Image (cartoon, helix red, strand yellow):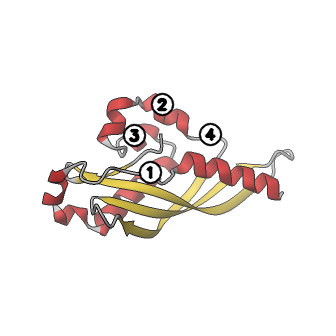
Amino acid sequence: MNLFRVFVLTIVVMLGGCQQSVKPGDNASATKTASAMTDDRLIQRHEERWAAVISVDFDKVYEYATPEYRALYSKTHLHNQYAAQIRRKAAHVANIRRDESDPTVAYVKTELTFQTLLPDGGNIYQDQILLDETWKFSDGEWWFVEPR
């Protein structure tokens, strides 16, 4: 069971979001809208995005990806990044940390509850994990930095 748990947690971490580096100063105009940069707005966007992930609405999830990601990758590409065998049940912000050198970048620690079927014939395995996510403020809004 321990090896299986490590395997599942590895998949969840790989597919749920990993901490990314973002170049400081990518968007100088972002600092103009300080009120939209609040943690409350970031938490709201985080909750909306995770509600879409949990409901398997990847067209909606795509809307939360950075404009740079959406310029390079299709909705189909994003959909293929998420493991269908992992059912995400709940997600909550555990911690927010702003990048010290760039306040338009935030690192969000997300507590994710998930389920998957065990290979033993159908028993359900449920657990929680902490994910590291990067969010970037640009064009007046918080955007999730997709790990790929």
Q: Is residue 86 left or right of residue 99?
A: right
Closer to the N terminus: mark 2 or mark 4?
2
**Residue carrying label 1:** 20
Q: Which mark is residue 77?
A: 2
What's the distance in space between the residues labelled 4 and 1, CA to CA?
A: 23 Å
Closer to the N terminus: mark 3 or mark 4?
3
Closer to the N terminus: mark 3 or mark 2?
3
Q: 123 or 112, which lies in front?
A: 112
**Residue carrying label 4:** 84
Total numbered badges shown on the rendered structure: 4
Horizontal and vertical percent position of residue 118 = 79, 49
Query: Tag 1: residue type?
Result: Gln
Please name the residue shown 21% across and 61% down the image: 36
Closer to the N terminus: mark 2 or mark 1?
1
Horizontal and vertical percent position of residue 132 = 50, 59
**Residue carrying label 3:** 62
Query: Tag 3: residue type?
Result: Tyr
Query: Tag 2: residue type?
Result: His
What's the distance in space between the residues labelled 2 and 4, CA to CA?
A: 14 Å
Q: Give the class, few, some or many, for how many residues have Cα within 10 Å of label 1's Cα (few <14, many ≥20).
A: some
Please name the residue shown 46% across and 41% down the image: 57
Which picture quadrant has residue 41?
bottom left
Q: Give the class, few, some or many, for how many residues have Cα within 10 Å of label 4's Cα (few <14, many ≥20).
A: few
**Proximity of marks 4 and 1: CB atoms separated by less than 8 Å:** no
Q: Disc 4 on helix, strand or loop?
A: loop
What's the distance in space between the residues labelled 3 and 4, CA to CA?
A: 16 Å
Q: Give the class, few, some or many, for how many residues have Cα within 10 Å of label 2's Cα (few <14, many ≥20).
A: few
Closer to the N terminus: mark 4 or mark 1?
1
Does residue 124 lie above or below 100 as drawn?
above
Q: Give the class, few, some or many, for how many residues have Cα within 10 Å of label 3's Cα (few <14, many ≥20).
A: many
What's the distance in space between the residues labelled 2 and 1, CA to CA?
A: 18 Å
What's the distance in space between the residues labelled 1 and 3, CA to CA?
A: 17 Å
